[in-house]
Amino acid sequence: MSGDTPALLFVDDQETNQRLYRAALKDIGAELLAAGSGEESLRLCRQRSFAMILLDVHLSGMNGFEVALRLR
């Protein structure tokens, strides 16, 4: 997608939830990216910026609250 297209990141360790988010958000005109862990989401956030991050707080490993604190 172009550089002007907003990017959204959803972070969830459940693949079913990732598919549901993608289906629900597919028509909003944004690039959709998914991360399956807090660590993966932090790596993606170091590489690019996101207009919005949908973050599950019940992640295995690093929980969503810790991810949010590190992103801040």
Image (tube, helix red, strand yellow):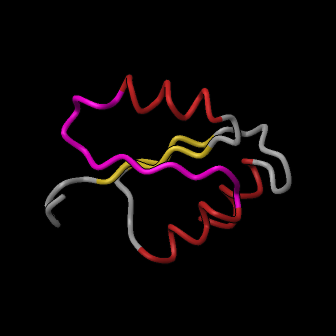
Q: Write the residue at 59% across / 28% down.
A: 17
Can the viewer see residue 4 in this picture?
Answer: yes
Residue 17, above or below 51: above
Q: Write the residue at 63% across / 35% down.
A: 15
Residue 50 position within the rendered picture, expressed as x and y whole percent measured from the top left: 38, 58
Residue 69 position within the rendered picture, expressed as x and y whole percent measured from the top left: 70, 61
Q: Write the residue at 85% across / 54% down.
A: 61
> Is 40 within the magenta?
no
Question: Which residue occupies the foreground of this view, 63 or 24?
Answer: 24
Relative horizontal placement of residue 37, taking residue 71 as reference (left or right): right
Relative horizontal placement of residue 56, taking residue 50 as reference (left or right): right
Residue 68's quadrant in the figure?
bottom right
Relative horizontal placement of residue 54, taking residue 12 as reference (left or right): left
In this view, the residue farthest toward the bottom is 47
What residue span does the magenta drawing correspond to?
25-38
Q: Write the residue at 66% across / 38% down.
A: 56
Relative horizontal placement of residue 11, taking residue 24 as reference (left or right): right
Residue 36 position within the rendered picture, expressed as x and y whole percent measured from the top left: 65, 50
Q: Quadrant of the N terminus?
A: bottom left
Question: Which residue occupies the foreground of this view, 21 or 19?
Answer: 19
Q: Quadrant of the C terminus?
A: bottom right
Can the viewer see residue 72 in this picture?
Answer: no
